[in-house]
Amino acid sequence: MIRFVREAVDEGGTSFDTAEVYGPYDNEELVGEALAPVRDSVVIATKFGFDLTPDGENRGLTSRPERIRAAVDGSLRRLRTDHIDLLYQHRVDPDVPIEDVAGAVAELVDAGKVLAFGLSEASSTTIRRAHAVHPVAAVQNEFSLWARDPEGPVLAACEEFNIGLVPFSPLGKGIVTGSVRAGAPFVVPIPGTRRLARVRENIGATEVRLSADHMARLTNLVDDLGVKGNRYNDHHMGLLDRDERSSGPGPNSTFSC
């Protein structure tokens, strides 16, 4: 994996996304070792938001300011760096006001430990409240043909405040190639892979242009296949901060597999 990450850099990859909960901890250590020789040439994003014990037990959500500070110190150590380029709240903690979260991250920015603040799986309301305290640089939500949740209020908030949208699982968790609407250069998807050939393929995808007919066929594919439902189990769906939606079919419906 270390060799793979370095080969990805050689192929032109410059942005890498990780989190303390991945492993837990192991992924940050791997990313830190792999990117140490080229640290000044890449962007590293990581995330806080879970109550993790030193041995990796996950005790649920927490974004208490003291936990954020401790999480960042741990991430810096594992990533072998003195700053995190983009720090996300991994999931919105309903027990901690988002204003307190943004304030804690702002202090880390002032200390030079963090360069930019992001949110993950956040609703437009949360985005707006956080942005009022400290600028939100990026929002990372699942977004593909199978999961259209960001369309509407979230995308509108991102456009209004010049916030980058970073879709994860843009290929529908490997089921089908995903797409976003034309004219949205602030959308930066995260394709996941373990193979260098796929890295080259993903980088090459930036040169692909879809016709209106292709877009219509891809959009209709979801309806044609009849795939509907939640994208996580009940527990993990309960961790998502989502905008209220009207029921019924349409482009804002949630599709998943």
Image: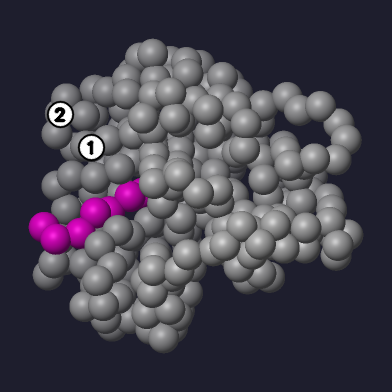
Closer to the camera, 168 or 152? 152
Residue wearing tag 2: 111
Magenta: main secondary structure equals strand
Instruction: Please report the residue visible at 24 percent of the width from the left and 71 percent of the height from the top.
Output: 12
At 39% from the left and 24% from the top, the residue drawn is 161
Q: Is residue 128 left or right of residue 253?
A: left
Tell me where residue 52 appears, x and y as whole percent.
48, 46
Q: Residues within 10 Å of mark 1 (few under 14, many from 20)?
A: many
Q: Does residue 55 appear in this view?
A: no
- Is residue 108 among the parts visible in the rendering? yes
* Relative height, residue 236 to residue 127 (above, below): below
Kindly identify the residue that appears in the image at 62 percent across and 38 percent down: 151
Estimate the spatial distance between the alpha carbons at disc 2 and disc 1, rounded to whole Å. Answer: 8 Å
The span shown in magenta is 40-48
Cβ–Cβ under 8 Å for marks 2 and 1:
yes
Mark number displayed over residue 114 = 1
